Image (tube, rainbow, N blue to C red):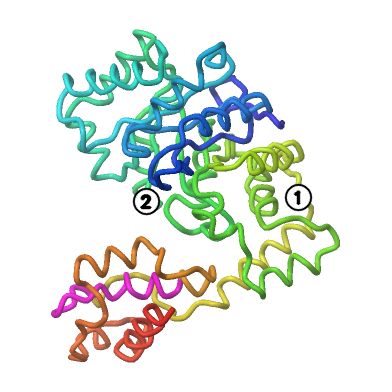
Amino acid sequence: MHYTQMGKLGIQSSSFGLGCMRFNGAASGDSVIDEQKAISLIRRAIDGGVTYLDTAYVYLDKTSETVVGKALRDGYREKVTIATKMPMEYVHNREEMEALLESELKKLQTDHIDFYLMHGINREKWEYFKSIGAPEFFNDMKQAGKIRYKCFSFHGPYEEFEYILNDWDWDLVQIQYNFMDIDYQAGKKGLELAGSKGIPVVIMEGLLGGRLARAPGNVQALYDAFPVKRSPVEWAFRWLCNHPAVSVVLSGCNEAEQIDENLRIFDTVAPGVMDASELELMDKVREAYLSRTKIGCTGCRYCMPCPNGVDIPGVFSVWNSVSLYDTDPKGNWDLRQIREKDHGADRCIQCGACEAACPQHLSIIDSLQSAWQELHAQ
C-alpha cells in the first residue's frame, strides 16, 4: 500500500480509501446491507493496509455508520481514521448538531471522528451552515476532542469552491474528480488550489460511479494498443494518484476480489508515477470518450425554463452520458428523476423558444425527439 503525506496535517494515509456507501448483496435484496459480508470486506481492506474509511450519516438508509462501527471492533478502530459527514437537511441549530454528532459517535462506537465533513455543500449550503453556527460548533468539537479535523465535501462550480475554500480555515476537502471531470465542479483548478494551500484532497467518483471501469470499444482499443497492459480501473486510479495534491482516492467495493485488486493497484501508485506516454494515452482516452458525445449542449440553461416543462439540458445530459459510457438508460438515476417529475421530452410542443435562445444554435427540437426515442428504445 502506498501512503501519502496529508498536506499541512502532517499525518499519513493510505492512498486507497474505502468508500462505505455502496455495500450490498443481502439475500433480501441489493438495497439491504449484507452486514457480515460488509464487515468482512472492511476488515479485509484494513488488513491489507487501508487506513482511511469514508462513510456518512445518510449512506445506505442511515445504516452505513452502524456497520462501520461494528467492523471496527476488536482493535480495528486503532488502525484507521474515520471520515463521516453532517448533512444540512438534518440540522437547524446547535442542539440538533450536537445530537446528530452524538448519534454518529454512538453508531461508529468511537469517542471521536477524525475527519468530520459538512456534507455536499455549495455556496448556498455553506452560507446556511454559517447561519446556524456550524463553524463555531466544529471548532468547539475539535477543541473538545470529538472531532480532529474540520472538512467539507463539495458539489458545485469552481467559483463557489474557491469562495468556500478561502472563507475558512479548512483541514481537508473532498471533491469529485477523474480524468473526464477535469473541468467539472471543482475540477483541476480546485485540486491545485487546495494543494497550494496545503489542504489535503480526498477524491470521490474516481470511476464516475463505475462508468469508467468498463471501456467502450473505441476506448478499449486505445488501452489494448498501449505497450503496458492495465485494466480501465487501474488506468483511472493511476491517473488520479499521479497528482501530487491527491491524498486519498475513495473506492467502494462489494466483493473481496475488488478489495484485493485495489490493494494491488494502490501498491504501485505515487505522485509522478505516469510518464509522458501514459499521460498522452489518457488524453487520447478522454478524447475517445468525448467523440461519443451526442450533442454539444454545454448546460448553459439559456433555453430554460421551457414553457412546457421540458428539462432540456437534463435530457441532453443523460443522452450524452449514456452514449459516452455505453450504459443502460434504464438504470440512469437522472433519467428516472426527469420522468418522475414529468419533465421529459415527450412534453415538447415544438414552439421553438429554446432554439431562439440557444447560443450554440443547436437543433434542439429534432435532437430532443431523437434523444427521447433512443433513451426509451433500449
Write the residue at 58% across / 36% down: 248
- Please name whichever residue, 78 or 7, is drawn nearer the observer in this view of the structure: 78
Magenta segment includes 309: yes
Magenta segment includes 225: no
Q: Amino acid at mark 2?
A: Glu
- Residue 273, given in percent of the width and then of the height, sits at 76, 45
Q: Look at mark 2 in the image and give the residue it sits on.
A: 159
Examine the rendered structure and indicate whether residue 182 appears above or below residue 250.
below
Examine the rendered structure and indicate whether residue 319 appears above or below residue 369.
above
In this view, which residue lies farthest toward the right? 227
Examine the rendered structure and indicate whether residue 204 appears above or below residue 83.
below
- Apparent side of residue 86 relative to residue 94 in the rendered image (left or right): right
- Apparent side of residue 188 relative to residue 268 in the rendered image (left or right): left
Q: Amino acid at mark 1?
A: Met
- Residue 13, given in percent of the width and then of the height, sits at 61, 26
Write the residue at 71% across / 32% down: 2
Q: Look at mark 1 in the image and give the residue it sits on.
A: 274
Image quarter where the C terminus lies is bottom left
Q: Nearer the viewer, mark 2 or mark 1?
A: 1
Image quarter of residue 166: top left
Q: Which residues are magenta?
A: 304-320
The numbered mark, 2 or 1, whose residue comes first in the sequence reads 2
- Residue 237, given in percent of the width and then of the height, sits at 65, 48
Examine the rendered structure and indicate whether residue 286 appears above or below residue 154.
below
- Residue 165, given in percent of the width and then of the height, sits at 39, 37
Write the residue at 33% across / 68% down: 335
**SS at badge 2:** helix
